[in-house]
Image (spheres, rainbow, N blue to C red):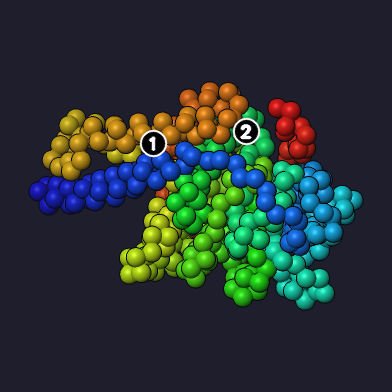
Amino acid sequence: MPLLHAMLNVVYLAMQLFTGAIGVYQIVMSLFGIWHKREPIRHDPAKRFAVIIAAHNEERVIGPLIDSLTAQEYPKALFDIHVIADNCTDHTADVARRHGAVVHIRTDHEKRGKGFAIEWMLERLWSSNVQYDAIVMFDADNLVAPDFLRIMNDKLIEGNKVIQGYLGVKNPFDTWVSVSMAISYWYSNRMWQNARQNLHLSSSLGGTGLCIDMALLKEMGWGATGLTEDLEFGVRCVERGIIPIWAHDAVVYDEKPTTLLASMRQRLRWMQGHFHCAKHHMVPLLMAGIRERNFVKFDAGVYLFQPARFLILFLTSLMLLLQISTPHTSLMSHVASFLPTDFWVAVNVFLYLQMPLALFLERVNWKAYVGLILLPFFLWTWGPVVFQAYFTKTNRRWAHTVHKRAIRLDELRSR
């Protein structure tokens, strides 16, 4: 038993140090997300965009997305909408054509998934006679705010190469799962992404609402065909010294799963891709950050070190539970505590209070505050998702998320 107690001490102390460090790190970083002032649009339209939409059986939702794009406050001659009908067995291509998009039929049952579809589409664009200054990527279930391309035009003219737009949710109040996901995104947008933008650190790429300078893309190549193609590309940018920035006012609305099973399946795919990417890039980024005294690279490595920002909340909550239960458990009674219970109480309080603060700062509907009651239950589901993802991280098979809500942009504003 003494050997077992010694081993438990080492594991438990390591868990405390790791969890305490990332908890405090996130609290400090999030303070820089409080400030945001909407920037005026300074430049006239000049950049030409190729808008790319990778779609697999999305006939129900792709029409409203294309309509929101054709309604952009940007000259029609300066952007083209390209839809990849990727291994579709429904009427996605017909619906996209009817709404005014250029449709590209792709059939490849071996190389399945969004990353492969984008790579295929880029090759077609580069071999065409049309010259674009940048590409913008959207998922088929999205809706796009009217000033999105105007803002991206501004950012590109100012010299930025990779820009991530604001990730909103178009169906936040469908179920307790969708509102929990929405709260997670409102929090991430404000206290994670906006904070890092204010600190001039790298934005985390979200795979949709993403703008990339075409010259950079040709130089680097896409090369991101995993389950989280956005993360892969963003990490490669940081390694090259290119900082993806956050455009808080360029809004994209995304459909979120409404059932816990669908949500966990989607998050499992994210985490599998995250672990795969971390395996190849985490240590080099951390080492480069320390060696070069480059906080941008170090912070990107820290992000890869913890597989999900909401895992921080799960881990700190678990640590608090272990700390409280330790005196009552015979096996844990011999385990030493490096950090006191009061520390874990304070960390959890500060982390959870960031949620309502983010909602207040983002001026979201009052219904979201009701969702805070069930949010802890949702956050705890990250635990089994991450655990399963770690042991299945070699999986490279793309799992399609079914989208059903054909909401239009004008309906969204009226809510």
> Do the CB atoms of the residues marked 1 and 2 lie less than 8 Å apart?
no
Is the C terminus in the top left, top right, bottom left or bottom right quadrant?
top right
Density class for disc 1 (Cα within 10 Å; few <14, some 14-19, many ≥20) is some
Residue at (58% x, 59% y) in the render? 230
| Amino acid at dot 2 | Pro
Q: Position of residue 212 (x, y in %)?
A: 64, 62
Residue 345 shown left or right of residue 81 in the figure? left
Nearer to us in this view, 353 or 176: 353
Residue at (30% x, 48% y) in the render? 21
Q: Position of residue 318 (x, y in %)?
A: 33, 38
Nearer to us in this view, 377 or 63: 63
Mark 2 sits on what residue? 172
Whole-number angstrom distance, CA of label 1 to CA of label 2:
22 Å
Mark 1 sits on what residue? 351
Residue 322 shown left or right of residue 157 in the figure? left
Q: Nearer the viewer, mark 1 or mark 2?
A: 1
Helix, strand or loop at label 1? It is helix
Task: Tell me if residue 334 comes above or below residue 118 in the rendering.
Answer: above
Residue 309 visible: yes
Helix, strand or loop at label 2? It is loop
